[in-house]
Amino acid sequence: MTPKRVLSGVQPTGSLHLGNWLGAIGNWIDLQKDFETFFCVVDLHAITVPHDPKLLRESTLSTAALYLACGVDPKRSTIFVQSHVSAHSQLCWILNCVTPLNWMERMIQFKEKAIKQGDNVSVGLLDYPVLMASDILLYDADLVPVGEDQKQHLELARDIAQQRINSKFSKKGDPILKVPKPLISSDGSKIMSLTNAANKMSKSDPNEGSRIGLLDPPELIAKKIKRAKTDSEAGLEFANPKRPEAHNLLTIYTLVTGKSKSEVEAECLEMGWGKFKTLLAEATVSALSPIQSSYQELVKDQAQLELILATGKEKADEVANTTLDRVSNAIGLLQKPI
Ligand code: AQP
């Protein structure tokens, strides 16, 4: 039986953090054992908000290196940069032309990000979910790992595939595009900001202290954890809704140590914040240490990194162009001369 196909990616909008690892890339390592996996660095998404060209280039390469350092294996997964595969932009244009504008105006992430941009909102930011639909649909992905925040975008990709392409353009009832399903990540995987547990940990938070970077040195990790917002209650607990900081830091501790929730609950029930923060810092540093060592090795050999991305591009191109041709043909674009 051919394995199901999975596609995912991260935007190179800055340095990857603990949330990106615990909520996304860390899960990819297991997925590549059971599925055919495509992981891209979604640089075209990163330019939907204002950006610095030099930083984007650096961040694109370092994001790819971090995929590898975290354990994404180029022998098992196709790793590539989104903009290297031109079919993403091409399918996006086609899907733009069949997607109703009012579907886009409903997107919650657009509304949230648009508020932050003020008068500077680009058409690209509104169009972000159609580009994401193109990313997914090009690879005939069966499953897409999504967190709570991305569920609406996946639903849109499904609606575009089913209602705007398959229903309208399929002649014999054979689907032109595969309608993907969500692969919902486990509960504990949403990591919140260290300075405000109401917000998720995010690359674009202007406060550096709100996140732990995957490449932060040990002293900086300890400093950020020491300064993380806490409360004045004694003992630590997961389930008290009035204590979101305790929930968040205990969740991180559970994930970085690999201990179960009940083990951590028992261990920390009577612990004070001071002792817990020292433990958490040590556990985080030791969980990130192999990733950091591997990253330092990988970036020494840029040619090897570029070769991995070139190989990924070739494989991705092949799959993506087949889908693009299928859609182009179905909607009536004249076949390209050979
Ligand atoms: N705090 C988080 N907890 C768990 N998972 C997270 N992810 C991001 N933040 C957390 C997951 O990481 C993947 C890649 O995300 P992305 O870079 O494409 O966009 P994002 O979700 O918007 O991530 P950031 O860090 O918040 O970036 P900016 O600040 O640029 O918007 C996704 O699978 C996401 O769920």
Image (cartoon, helix red, strand yellow):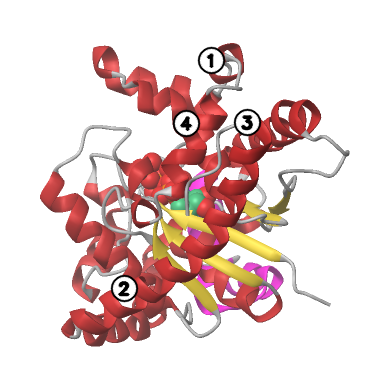
Q: Nearer the viewer, residue 333 or 35?
A: 333
Query: Which numbered disc flags the more N-terminal residue, 2 or 3?
Result: 2
- Give the numbered dot on residue 230: none
Tag 4 residue: 93
**How far apart, in angstroms, are the residues tagged by discs 2 and 3?**
40 Å
- Residue type highlighted by circle 2: Ala
7 vs 110: above or below? below
Q: Which residue is mark 2?
A: 65
Task: Say which residue label 3 marks.
Answer: 332
Q: CA distance from mark 4 to mark 2?
A: 30 Å
Whether label 4 touches label 2, CB < 8 Å: no
Q: Residue 140's quadrant in the figure?
A: bottom right
Q: Residues within 10 Å of mark 1 (few under 14, many from 20)?
A: few
Q: Pointer 3 and pointer 4: residues touching (CB < 8 Å)? A: no
Mark sitting earlier along the chain (4/2): 2
- Amino acid type of the residue that numbered disc 1 sits on in the rendered structure: Glu
Name the amino acid type tagged 3. Answer: Gly
Q: Which mark is residue 105?
A: 1
**From this viewpoint, is residue 70 visible?**
yes
Q: Nearer the viewer, mark 2 or mark 3?
A: 3
Q: Are marks 2 and 3 in contact (CB under 8 Å)?
A: no
Coordinates of residue 331 in the picture (x, y in percent): 64, 31
Cα gap from disc 3 to disc 4, whole angstroms: 14 Å
Q: CA distance from mark 2 to mark 1?
A: 35 Å
Q: Earlier in the sequence, mark 3 or mark 4?
A: 4
